[in-house]
Amino acid sequence: MSRFNMRSWSGPRPSVEEMRSDGAQIVKRVVAALAVLAFVAGGAWLIRDRDPGTAAYPRSGDPAIVTAEVERRVLESLLSTRGTVVSPSVATLTAPSPPEGAFAVVVTGLPTTAGAEVAAGDAVVELNGRPVLAIASSIPLYRDLRPGFRGPDVAALQVALEAMGHPIRASEGDAFGSDTQAAVESVYEDAGYEARYTLGDKKAVSDARADADRQLTVAKDAANAAKREGVADPTAEAAVVTAQNERDRVRATEGVLLVAGEVLIAPSLPATLVDLAVSVGQQLTSGTPVATVGSPSLQVQIELTPAQMSELTPDVDIDVDWGTDYSATCAPGTVTPTSSAGQATNTGEPPKGNPLPSTAEPGAGSAVPGQEPDPSASSEAGFQMVVSCLPLPPVESLGESMRVGITARRSAGPVLVVPSTAITTTASGATFVEVSAGDGGAHRVEVTVGGEAAGFNAVEPVDGSLDEGDRVHVRGP
């Protein structure tokens, strides 16, 4: 007992220092007593919840324990991303430089409208009073074609002209000869325009050819007259050769002229005029985008991060929607790596969305076969998948963003599934789950772990029983 308690009330009053000393002693003893009580209570709690015969886990009924039900189902990964509506086989017309004799390029007519179908031979736009004609060819025109020119561009043009119903003799080969010129002339006439000609117009070409024919006739008549008189006239004979060469030259080099700036080459036709970026009266600078045509079978270009790409398997389900105006199911397509700037690293025509082989193994988490992520790519790089959808996206959705939902199948059939946070790995590498027991305790079941998707893992019991409907302990974050 403290000196304060032992002191008689009839004796001298304690000093302030003595009272402070006694108070400090009391506080220390109270704190020590509380610590002992806490230790005893904690030991009793541990002894109470230890379940002989099982691991020392808290009872499943304790509010601090979170459990989840073991499920048997197909393990799937649900991904959400965005996609852009694109048109395969796209061809874009840009404004040419002003032709000789003109100081500007001006839009003088719009024969069609955005969203309309463009067939081979149709005029897409009119510049400086001249049409720009759509032609399906495998090789773009890289030069103006004149009579007598040869090359792969001429051969590709001949294939396109024959597909439009204009026959060309095989003997013409890959030359821009009379049959090819006649076919080009017909294409212009069908579009309601006159073709261009090397000498300015058709009459000038006709006059030049007629004049060359006359000169040859005159030279031949002179040479024949000398022969009838029995007089050798070398000058007359030479004049015939000269006139013959000139006539051949005129026929070979003067005629229809196909100007590259008056042709829009598309990979395939008919197509859809997906964009018309100009208006009548607008003056254009060289290289300005004028019109874009593309396949009416619009596709959706899906953007994927490397993490999302790693989730994909060949038998994915893809759904897209554009608000309430459009929704569709799409077939998996080919995948192209993109740079950190979001541009596809390959070049050429966008992929058409060919189906992928269905070779996914249960629990496999690899990317699409043949489309493994490039380990050298930066963390900002990603992937693009171009998919074909049914029904087709409407023309007005071209270039618009759509919501994309991807269901990546992770197992070939139903498997036992538990939350990933229910799986524990020991130092030896064994994996187990803690299964709630009927008596309120819990026991370990060793499992093998399969694929993971959306925070769940496929598991199979190795040592012990694990069934659908069992409840397993789930660790907190």
Image: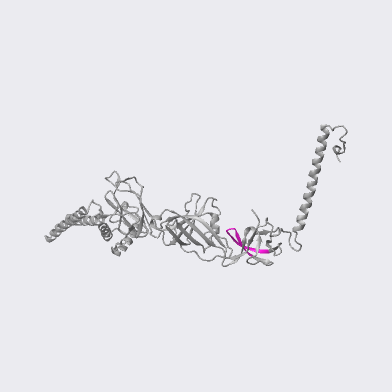
The quadrant in which residue 294 appears is: bottom left
Residue at the front extreme, as displayed: 10
Q: Is residue 391 left or right of residue 170?
A: right
Please check the rendered image and state whether residue 238 is part of the magenta-colored stretch, yes or no.
no
Could you tell me what secondary structure mostly forms the magenta stretch? strand
| Residue 242 placement (x, y as % from top left) | 21, 55
Q: Which residues are magenta?
A: 446-459
Residue at the left extreme, as displayed: 229
Q: Residue at x 80, y 45 (%)?
A: 32
| Residue 79 placement (x, y as % from top left) | 53, 57
Q: Quadrant of the N terminus?
A: top right
| Residue 475 placement (x, y as % from top left) | 66, 56
The quadrant in which residue 67 appears is: bottom right
Q: Residue at x 32, y 63 (%)?
A: 163
The one nearer the camera, 95 or 422, is: 422
Q: Is residue 99 above or below residue 216?
A: above
Q: Is residue 51 above or below residue 39?
A: below
